[in-house]
Image (cartoon, rainbow, N blue to C red):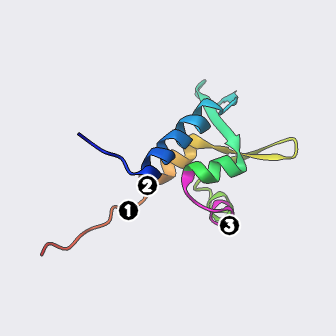
Amino acid sequence: MNILSCSELLYFILVEIIEANAGIMVENEKNNRRRLVEFKDGCRYGKFGRTKAYELIGDARIRAYKMGGKTMIDLDSVDKYHASLPRVETRAN
């Protein structure tokens, strides 16, 4: 049986809420839908702060769009960024 810590459980609940409320769905070039969320929710989902988010956007590691006065973050690009991170190598004892 896998028991989650309180913070892990809250994270999974938060991810479900963000994905459920990714109310802005737009067509992209491959006729797939983009999962766009407001900037603060994208930061929460990606587990990074505002400064890191702007750095990643500037480096084209994640995608962001302007809708009116709001900056929207593409959650698929955040997932792709996380998948590109190097794995931590541990030393064998």
Q: Main secondary structure of the magenta part?
A: helix
Q: Tell me, for residue 86, which label it has, or none.
A: 1
Residue 91, given in percent of the width and then of the height, sits at 19, 74
Q: Residue 86 location, x and y as percent? A: 38, 62
Label number found at residue 84: 2
Element at label 1: loop
Question: Which of labels 3 and 1 is toward the front?
Answer: 3
Per the rendered image, the range of residues in magenta is 46-53
- Residue 29 visible: no
Give yes or no for residue 48 being in the magenta stretch.
yes
Q: Amino acid at mark 3?
A: Thr
Which of pointers 3 and 2 indicates the residue nearer the eye? 3
> Where the N terminus falls, by quadrant?
top left
Specify the amino acid type for callout 1: Pro
**Number of marks drawn:** 3
Q: Residue at x 60, y 52 (%)?
A: 44
Tell me how far mark 3 sits from mark 2, CA to CA: 20 Å
Q: Which residue is mark 3?
A: 51
Whether residue 93 is visible to the viewer of this picture, yes or no, is: yes
For the point 68% across and 40% down, the residue is 37
Residue situated furthest top in the rendering: 31
Residue in view at x 23 percent, y 70 percent? 90
